[in-house]
Image: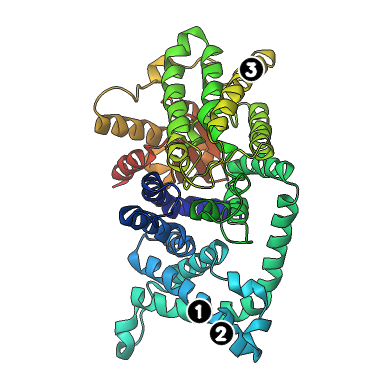
Amino acid sequence: MMKYLQRIGRSLMLPVAVLPAAAILMGIGHWIDPSGWGAGSPVAAFLIKAGGSIIDNIPFLFAVGIALGMAKEKDGSAALSGLVAFLVVKTLLAPDSVAMLQGIDVAKVDPSFAKISNAFIGILSGLIASLMYNRFSHVKLPDALAFFSGKRLVPIMTSVAMLVVSVALLFVWPVVFTGLVSFGEGISKLGAVGAGIYGFLNRLLIPIGLHHALNAVFWFDTAGINDIGNFWAGKGTKGVTGMYQAGFFPVMMFGLPAAALAMYHTAKTKKKKEVASLMLAAGFASFFTGVTEPLEFSFMFVAPLLYVVHAVLMGLSLAVAALFHWTAGFTFSGGFIDFVLSSSLPLANKPYMLLVQGLVFAVIYYFLFRFLITKFNLMTPGREEDTDDDDKVSIMAGKSNDKFAVLASKIYDGLGGDANVVSVDNCTTRLRLEVKDMNAVDQKKIKATGVPGINVVGAHSIQVIVGTSVQFVADEMIKLRK
């Protein structure tokens, strides 16, 4: 079950990767016309509407992305089926349709159906479509119906399946929606404390990939909070809307890079050069793009105490930003790019104070991490037991293609090569691998390549955290299997 949920998290990365495009378009539009939302400039209106076309259709993106990511083969018919699935349930459970099905006036329809077009339903549609693809994509029908065999059959069976799902949701969705709204309202009523609880849980759930489910409640229009959508659309209260995003900026732009500096300073002298390369790359990714996995996974499992402290500090950061009503927003993550793009939006409130807060958190992260590492002799990068230096490979030297090929070869060899590797896949920053025998995996050999971390998630599943260049490493590794 856990493996399945992690695959969902990985599949969400494809549609989420589209969101920065919306941030760029809307950010430039608001720079041109910061107060009129395009009313005073056709160019600004064009850019803002173009970005809104992505933000406003997140459920469609999730349906297509999940269907493609969860299918056994990355095929266009799976993506098309995800779209079909969402369109069926969106149409059948629209308030007008529900009123007709129940024989009541549309005004008396349960209000939950007005929110049927949401990220949660998009994800569910994608999952159903992927199941239909995996089951029917190779089915051969009788000659008279041969045209509809195989992949052409998938969208058809998906639409049939969604008829059944829609009937079930007719009764189940109001209950689910009420539960999600109650949870979201319960947290939101706590104000700054609620934002802090959310921030703490967001980080705590990352190792198992379930933070996406939590994010859907607060960031998207699953339970009516829609913090990202409302912030970028200018719908809400200045200083309040954006409270589930703002606190990420001080940690991602300042806190985690400071933690990286602390880990560098506490590394063994002879390993400082190696650790410097890792921490510089991971720290820059966290600051500039808000991609924190390379840095977090470098200490998540080797020093879990630090990760719990990091989760607490993340919660504290969100609570502080919410308490003082400092807001900024993101469409991808809390890095420099999104900070700059969102700072000119109408609902951004004293965003510069998040930079001040970030400097304070940088000091806290640095000294707290350094104290805990030295006090408890935590095995952060560069403090582990010595290994054979001859096995190490510099992944920063040489041409890019050569670098990725060498890294892929070393990792593949550490996994046990062709005799042990079953499948190779990747998400935003991690290689996701299936092996026959976990005992045949040489983790020391893999770690000697300088990767930020390794995560064993099952008897046959292992993840290697590479960083934002993971796709190129995965591509080279797939070549080795041919």
x and y, in percent, of residue 459 in the image: 57, 45
Left or right: 21 with respect to 258?
left
Q: Nearer the viewer, residue 153 or 439?
A: 153
Q: Nearer the viewer, residue 118 or 320?
A: 320
x and y, in percent, of residue 226 in the image: 58, 56
Q: Secondary structure at mark 3?
A: helix
Marks 2 & 1, CB-CB < 8 Å contact: yes
- Give me the C-alpha separation between circle 1 and circle 3: 55 Å
x and y, in percent, of residue 328 in the image: 53, 41
Amino acid type of disc 3?
Ile
The residue sitting at 65% across, 82% down in the picture is 107
- Decide: few, some or many residues near mark 3? Use Cα within 10 Å; few <14, some 14-19, many ≥20: many
Amino acid type of disc 1?
Thr
The residue sitting at 53% across, 46% down in the picture is 460
Marks 2 & 3, CB-CB < 8 Å contact: no
- Give me the C-alpha separation between circle 2 and circle 3: 60 Å
- Decide: few, some or many residues near mark 2? Use Cα within 10 Å; few <14, some 14-19, many ≥20: some
Read off the residue under disc 1.
91
**Residue 245's image quarter?**
top right
x and y, in percent, of residue 280 in the image: 43, 22
* The label number, if any, that marks residue 97 in the structure image: 2
